[in-house]
Image (spheres, grey):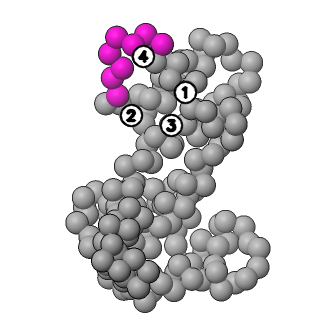
Amino acid sequence: MVSNTSASPTWEKFFGEEADRATGSCTSPRRSLFLPLQLRVDHFQHLVYDKPDASPDERKAMWQEMERLYLPWRNYGDLPHVAGGGFWQLQRHIYLNAFYYIDYCLALTCALQIWKLAESDRSAATAAYEAPLRARRPAAFAEMVAEAGLHNPFSVGVLGEVLAEVRGAL
């Protein structure tokens, strides 16, 4: 497992003896374990927006499809509403903040690329992190990612490559 201080060596200045605990929650490759949950919700929303007239049963079937795709190990046992595809209704932000998770998925995919870079070249990782900040101008996401020298999370295969690195670290 990656040491937290390799990814965030300056955090000791801020957190003192608590640096390992603080950085562990932010820089750990274990953060990637939340991606299937996030991707399931955003993909479901795409399906629903693509078919706004879907019946309740069709929406439940869409949710079940997403659960099979992203969380195939999930088993709700004898809870009929959630086992039948109703769990999506518990996702409050689907109603209040559509596509809420996409920012987190994109940011995490980029952060994990920087984490991997920090393992071999801390100064290059710092430069990648700071590149979009130095631009001091509005920019599209893809442009900021390119300026940082990272791979665009929307590109085919990038998420798989990033997760392969994480898998190796875990």
Marks 1/3: CA–CA distance: 13 Å
Report how far apart the C-alphas of labels 2 and 4 lie in the structure. 13 Å
The percent position of residue 124, horizontal first and vertical second, equals 45, 86
Q: Quick one: label 2 or label 1, which is nearer the N terminus?
A: 2
Residue at (42%, 64%) from the top-left corner? Answer: 26
Q: Is any atom of residue 46 visible in this view?
A: no
Residue type, label 2: Leu
**Residue under circle 4?**
83
* Quadrant of the image occupied by residue 80: top left
Residue pictured at 53% horizontal, 53% vertical:
105
Is residue 130 among the parts visible in the rendering?
yes
Q: Are marks 3 and 2 in contact (CB under 8 Å)?
A: yes
Q: Earlier in the sequence, mark 3 or mark 2?
A: 3
User: Mark 1 or mark 4, which has the lower sequence index?
Assistant: 4
Mark drawn on residue 71: 2
Outermost residue toward the bottom in this view: 123
State if disc 1 and disc 2 touch (CB < 8 Å).
no
Mark with earlier residue (2, 4): 2
Instruction: Residue type at mark 1: give it.
Output: Leu
Residue picked out by circle 3: 40
Q: Residue tagged by mark 1?
A: 90
